[in-house]
Image (cartoon, helix red, strand yellow):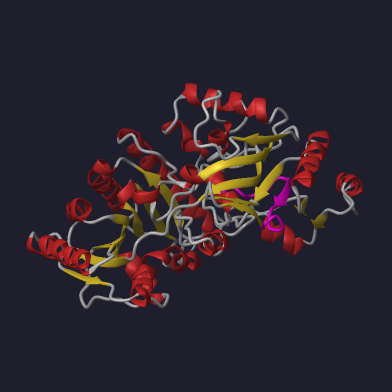
């Protein structure tokens, strides 16, 4: 039987594409967490901003929650629709709307895949420098919703730094045109930045003005084998001191093992407990020689025991696969993921504290670490043993995540670096934000989403 609410939406927007088949509800109703059973009322696929506004007005009248959906590559349950919400998929709003060469601003719709955005920038001899391993499936709307960072934050910063303006539909159906591409704008509060990282709880992004940059100079990639955790920061300091870094990542031997099993090529004969991959400017032979000097300096000090530097773009891509393919290689194993951040200087002490907790509390679990040392963002992946049920596994992981959250509080870190709070982490929000901050966040939501329809239940529960 057709839901009368959906019939009324169809009458209101006769040209709106709606999907209600069970397979579609399951596909669009979840993200990469796979922990909740999808249960959306339907999937709406608008093609223009006016349709989004009318959908929101309908949702207000019907008191139906709305879950915005991009590439659904998130790891915090931010795109899950498990309680009869309407999913708004932006996959049809995926066009480049225009380019202003003087301002170097590309105007795009939220469903544009990151890789397509990067290609569009190249067509204008420019670059969009924010980058992730999921570039082929994540969308700019989702990147904005979580203020995603990725692998080149050390040079280019997070998504926030590249958003010149936004058009956003609020929880009343109003359309806000925020900042309009201005570089300087001191006319009151910058609501554009309020929307970035809000996970769709304050408004639905329907258009983004994205700044582009000069293409980077030629670069090289170096992968180093590191014998001990305390050496990671010594290597980072040496590389940052002498090289112009665009990325500095690390992963463990367990991560390398999974990636190699997934098809990547191991460049080393011997196993080391830690590895570093760094990309740096190498426009000439002198810069390449400088990288060799850095490697030799680290080798002589015992901070690394092996290394390889790319000699071609193909080899550079092969080396980057060691880092980019980690999440993909772990996905079939149903890992429990934590995406956290601390100050760069606190990484060694924090990692040691957490390793002691894992060894004490998780002796039966395979722990895979990797992340962005250059910006203090660490990814902790717990692999589910085959003999452990999904329910038992999540209970055990959440028990230790509480210890992780307490440790982060001690080191003044964050339970979410770049994937948002969503459903997974909202119980730990108080470890990162004070009661006063959370009260203010709730107050802001009441102003922009007075009926509580935008991504309900995400980040925090209603007061």
Residue placed at 51% from the left, 42% from the top? Answer: 421
- Of all residues shown, which one is farthest toward the top? 436
Quarter-of-image position of residue 59:
top right
Q: On the picture, is 78 further left or further right than 132?
A: right
> Residue 77: horizontal and vertical position, in percent?
57, 49
Q: Is the stretch drawn in magenta largely helix, strand or loop?
A: loop
Q: Residue at x 46, y 31 (%)?
A: 430
Q: Is residue 249 magenta?
A: no
Task: Give how far across and how far down residue 404 sits, in percent.
Answer: 37, 43
Please provide percent x and percent y for residue 201: 62, 37
- Reply above or below: 220 against 400: below
- Residue at 78% across, 50% down: 41
State the quadrant of the N terminus. Answer: bottom right
Write down the region rendered in magenta: 76-95
The answer to which image quadrant residue 202 occupies is top right
Left or right placement of residue 118 versus residue 381 in this view? right
Query: Viewer-proximal residue, 14 or 358?
Result: 14
Q: Is residue 362 above or below residue 386?
A: above
Could one spot residue 166 in this view of the protein?
A: yes
Quadrant for the C terminus, please.
top right
Q: Is any atom of residue 76 visible in this view?
A: no
């Amino acid at each position: 039987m057709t839901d009368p609410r959906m019939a009324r939406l169809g009458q209101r927007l006769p040209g709106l594409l709606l999907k209600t088949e069970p397979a579609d509800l399951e596909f669009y109703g979840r993200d990469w967490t796979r922990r909740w059973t999808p249960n959306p009322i339907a999937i709406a696929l608008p093609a223009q901003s006016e349709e989004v506004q009318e959908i929101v007005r309908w949702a207000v009248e019907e008191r139906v929650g709305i879950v915005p959906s991009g590439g659904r590559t998130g790891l915090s349950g931010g795109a899950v629709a498990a309680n009869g919400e309407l999913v708004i998929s932006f996959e049809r709003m995926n066009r480049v709307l225009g380019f202003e060469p003087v301002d170097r601003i590309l105007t795009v719709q939220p469903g544009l895949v990151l890789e397509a955005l990067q290609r569009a920038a190249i067509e204008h001899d420019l670059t969009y420098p924010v980058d992730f391993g999921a570039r082929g499936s994540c969308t700019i709307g989702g990147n904005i919703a979580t203020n995603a960072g990725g692998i080149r934050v050390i040079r280019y910063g997070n998504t926030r730094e590249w958003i010149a303006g936004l058009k956003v539909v609020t929880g009343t159906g109003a359309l806000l045109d925020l900042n309009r591409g201005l570089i300087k704008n001191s006319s009151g509060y910058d609501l554009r930045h309020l929307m970035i990282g809000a996970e769709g709880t304050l408004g639905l992004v329907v258009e983004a003005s994205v700044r582009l940059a000069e293409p980077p100079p030629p670069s090289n990639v170096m992968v180093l084998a590191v014998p001990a955790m305390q050496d990671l920061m010594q290597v980072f300091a040496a590389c940052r001191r002498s090289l112009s870094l665009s990325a500095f990542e690390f992963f463990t031997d367990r991560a390398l093992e999974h990636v190699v099993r997934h098809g990547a090529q191991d460049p080393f004969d011997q196993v080391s407990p830690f590895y570093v991959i760094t990309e740096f400017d190498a426009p000439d032979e002198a810069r390449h020689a400088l990288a060799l000097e850095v490697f030799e300096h680290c080798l002589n000090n015992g901070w690394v025991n092996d290394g390889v530097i790319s000699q071609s773009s193909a080899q550079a891509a092969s080396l980057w696969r060691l880092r980019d393919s980690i999440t993909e290689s772990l996905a079939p194993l149903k890992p429990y993921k934590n995406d956290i951040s601390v100050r760069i200087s606190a990484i060694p002490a924090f990692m040691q504290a957490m390793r002691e907790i894992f060894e004490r509390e998780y002796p039966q679990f395979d722990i895979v670490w990797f992340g962005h040392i250059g910006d203090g963002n660490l990814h902790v992946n717990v692999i589910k043993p085959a003999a452990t049920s999904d329910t038992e596994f999540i209970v055990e992981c959440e028990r230790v995540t509480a210890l992780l959250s307490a440790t982060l509080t001690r080191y003044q870190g964050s339970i979410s670096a770049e994937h948002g709070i969503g459903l997974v982490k909202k119980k730990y929000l108080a470890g990162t934000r004070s009661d006063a901050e959370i009260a203010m966040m709730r107050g802001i939501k009441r102003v922009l989403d007075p009926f509580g329809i935008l991504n309900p239940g995400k980040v925090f529960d209603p007061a």
